[in-house]
Amino acid sequence: MPTLEKTFELKQRGSTVRQEIIAGLTTFLAMVYSVIVVPNMLGAAGFPAESVFIATCLVAGLGSILIGLWANAPMAIGCAISLTAFTAFSLVIGQKVAIPVALGAVFLMGVVFTLISATGIRAWILRNLPSSIAHGAGIGIGLFLLLIAANGVGLVVSNQAGLPVKLGDFTSFPVMMSLIGLALIIGLEKMKIKGGILWVIIAITIVGLIFDPNVKFGGEIFKIPTFGENSLFLQLDFMGALQPAILPVVFALVMTAVFDATGTIRAVAGQADLLDKDGQIINGGKALTSDSISSLFSGLFGTAPAAVYIESAAGTAAGGKTGITAIVVGVLFLLMLFFQPLAFLVPGYATAPALMYVGLLMLSNVSKLDFDDFVGAMSGLICAVFIVLTANIVTGIMLGFAALVIGRIVSGDIKRLNVGTVIIAIVLVAFYAGGWAI
């Protein structure tokens, strides 16, 4: 296949078509749980699950093919679980933002991030957004996911007196299945079993079919793809997303995407040996732009913002080094469009362990905080903690920035501040002080 070898630099990167196909299948198995988890999470916020399933498959399929063809990168794109949680539980449920406006915010985020990725603005933002706040946001989002998953199955419930939460019914079927599932995922991931998360979801679903009367198989496996009667396709309210109250949300989405996308892409590129002599990502600009363009798809189709999945590392570990890996993933997600009935068979307690596991992985950001820089580390932790306590990512980021700037001034470490960081902090605090933030 000389054309493929030339187009994707197979020989130059030390790979083969067979190796790339295996890597693509590996990545797909590691992240296909997203087409089950994302509709469940957004469905809880009132999004029509059938429409979200189609949109999620399309975003993952088209986004992965785009990054494979254009950036020749072995990275897969899908709806980010963390930003799905933000869209569903913070933006729509918590802040009462209408679904079309939320989709407009997702689309606007994609527009801004695409401009940032295609110009030098992204470099300026990266220079002026402290890494401690970015890591703190990752920690907070991880804790937020854990809380959402635990509450969804009844492991953690609201408390009418004293602290806001308490232990639920520990012996209930959903709780036991979720905890067993989480333990199984951790064990399988430790053993590096391909698609461990998916196998646990399937296993718990089968157990549910046998023992849970609420889980029923309707006899249908294949279905012609359709957005359904309550389609969200092109239902975004772009003008509504331009309201002053919604702009902090867009900022939070963009900031999270800037750091998450860059960090994930760099990690996967490093594992695939795709860094140049200066340590920069080969075709990194194209990869980041592919990521941001995929969020435009999200707003148009009606689902959560997209991002490169860290599960792409499973494929690079299996030998993926070129865009063929990503294209294989994309094609498989497009084929998933025809298996919608099977996806909706899965109960919430089967996907909860996956959410908990992803949340736990995100807590590893604690190790990235530099505690020699005490003010920076504490500001990052303030960001993390208040994301959970307020159930709002923007609030945590705002408090983290404010603490960082004030802490630097009080400690006499003002030389470590730059104008960009101060400007961002002032803008965020002004949004809250002015009552514009949601």
Image: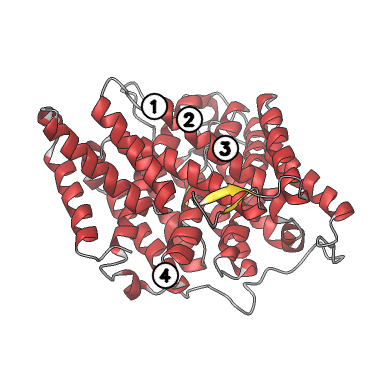
Q: Are marks 3 and 2 in contact (CB under 8 Å)?
A: no
Which image quarter is the N terminus in? top right
- Type of the residue with mark 3: Glu
Q: Secondary structure at mark 4?
A: loop
The location of residue 388, given as percent across then percent down, is 44, 47
Mark sitting earlier along the chain (3/2) = 3
- Type of the residue with mark 4: Val
Mark sitting earlier along the chain (1/4) = 4
Q: Secondary structure at mark 3?
A: loop
- Type of the residue with mark 1: Lys
Mark sitting earlier along the chain (4/3) = 4
Which image quarter is the C terminus in? bottom left
The disc at residue 311 is 3
Q: Are marks 4 and 3 in contact (CB under 8 Å)?
A: no
Identify the residue at image location x=28%, y=50%: 116
Q: Residues within 10 Å of mark 2 (few under 14, many from 20)?
A: some
The disc at residue 364 is 2
Q: From the viewer's perspective, is 429 left or right of 324? A: left
The Cα atoms of the two marked residues, 1 and 2, are separated by 8 Å
The disc at residue 368 is 1
Q: Are marks 3 and 1 in contact (CB under 8 Å)?
A: no
Mark 4 sits on what residue?
A: 97
- The answer to whether residue 330 shows anywhere in this view is no
Identify the residue at image location x=85%, y=61%: 213
